[in-house]
Image (cartoon, rainbow, N blue to C red):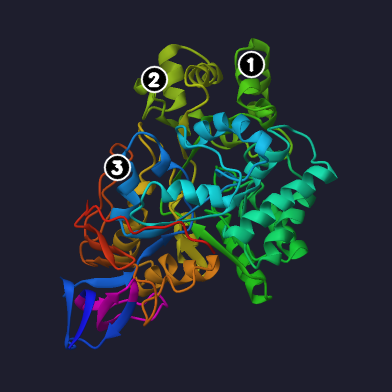
Amino acid sequence: MSRFDLLIRGGLVFDGTGRPGREADVAADGGRLTILPPGAAADAAEVIDARGRAVAPGFIDVHTHSDGVALLRQDDRELVRAAVIQGVTTEISGNCGSGLFPALPERVDAMRADTRVTFGGDVGMYQDFTGFAEAHARVPRANHLASLVGHGTLRSGVLGPVDRPATPTELAAMCDLLDRALSQGAAGLSTGLIYTPGTYASTDEVVALAAVAARHGKPYVTHLRDEMSRVEEALEEAVEIARRSGAPLHVSHHKTAGRYAWGRTERTLPRIAELRAGGMDVTCDVYPYTAGSTALAAMLPPWANDGGLAALTRRLGSPEERDRMRRAIAEGVPGWENTVGNGGWDRISVACAPRNPQTEGRTVAELAAAAAADPLDVVAELLLSEGGEVTIISHSMIEDDVRRVLAAPYAMIGSDGVPKPGGRPHPRWAGTFPRVLGHYVRELGLLTLESAVHKMTGMAAARFGLAGRGVIRDGAHADLVVFDPDTVADGATFTDPLLPPSGVEAVVVGGSVVAREGVETGARPGTVLEL
């Protein structure tokens, strides 16, 4: 009789390839899988009875902003474990052009304030991917972490947060930092072209950097320059960057947001399908909600953030500069995704403002009406009070567009979770994967179970080069999730955003059970993956 570390008996195995489930026993030993016939003669130090349950590869969250949450000085386990207990065994961070590495040595200290604003605490800044990985190794993880290299971080790490073109010498330095990080194991290049300082960059600058990713065989991952009224134009810029650089293209959290773009997935998705049919390697990800989340400062025109946080603070304190910001939002700025102009302050609610908790959960329009003040002035005072650290939720999409992207055969699942301590973060950080399985698979029938699992596992692993992950087969890494297809559902809400899901019964990382029935076991087998 064979003996293993872990044996999962009697489950219906969805192997991550998109094939229908099949009955099998799944064993783990030394962190690797062995697939056995149902009821095979085998034993293990730990046995899980999975009768009536689905057994899938561990979910891969392809889009997170969880770069530093485990590094925060306060041990906020409720926030850290939210991903783990919904079945996420690998998180991919460094998205939207923002991360915790790399930077020229002389710029590291200057960038710490920006990392605090972005990640909600003093999580440090690292010269390279190796330093980032070593920091996480000192804080044992329950699940795995991979990271892209953020273009905005590269730009800040070489030029600073300034609105000007990079010189040839500066661009070469950015390319060298990127090349080093990718050689050390970073997963690809990301951009956030609506965010400063990424928005200050030309297409040519991004092409030069994406060409470095292409030489490493790693993807160009982009938050498009506009996801609203100019979304089609922004998609074509991404296509141009991919074609000129030779890098595979991945479009982050694809959406058509704001009232002027609702319904345009009927044009963007056929365009992506056309590109794929023509041989282009292009994919996207999506989260299953009609609201997004980002920094409140991103609602201001790009020039307001020129020079970084200190410069923004000076402008917010000036009545004349506030008037300029008001006019920019009302009239628009060429090339700028004007979220408020495309939606309104009534669609922007405060998610996290630690010094002003009475604002959390309320829209800017409500706060302005209560204070008999102009919304821009309310925003300015809130940002000044919080040192720029304000997170918002933007109710900017419609359900039809979300469903169309979810159903696209090349779309995978990413939470876009922003796990900052305190406040009311977007529920997607705690609910994305059970929400897809419960609401969109079981309740709506938008996806088959095998298709949804594929989007969460095998498809994601293939896109980001996670060899031996995202599949259940002999020799694969022993990252697994056991769930009940009849009851799995998200619990997190906008009012109570960290409520755990139901129906996720066991989560396995590297052959160790890290969560049972929504409770962490204390096992910490997770690592930073070098790709």
In terms of depth relative to the viewer, which is nearer, 16 or 211?
A: 211
**Which residue, given by chain and number where applicable, does mark 3 sit on?**
77
Specify the principal SS of the magenta part.
strand
Residue at 42% across / 78% down in the picture? 17
Evaluate whether residue 397 shows in this view: yes
Which of the image's four quarters has the N terminus?
bottom left
**Which residue, given by chain and number where applicable, does mark 2 sit on?**
356
Residue at 60% across / 31% down in the picture? 109
Looking at the rendering, the stretch of residues picked out in magenta corresponds to 8-32
Label 2 neighbour load within 10 Å: few <14, some 14-19, many 20+? some
Point out which mark residue 314 bears.
1
Q: Secondary structure at mark 1?
A: helix
Q: Circles 1 and 2: CB distance less than 8 Å? A: no
Return the x and y of residue 431 as percentages of the image width and height. Answer: 33, 51
Label 1 neighbour load within 10 Å: few <14, some 14-19, many 20+? few
Which of the image's four quarters has the C terminus?
bottom right
Disc 1 marks a residue whose amino acid type is: Arg
Disc 2 marks a residue whose amino acid type is: Asn
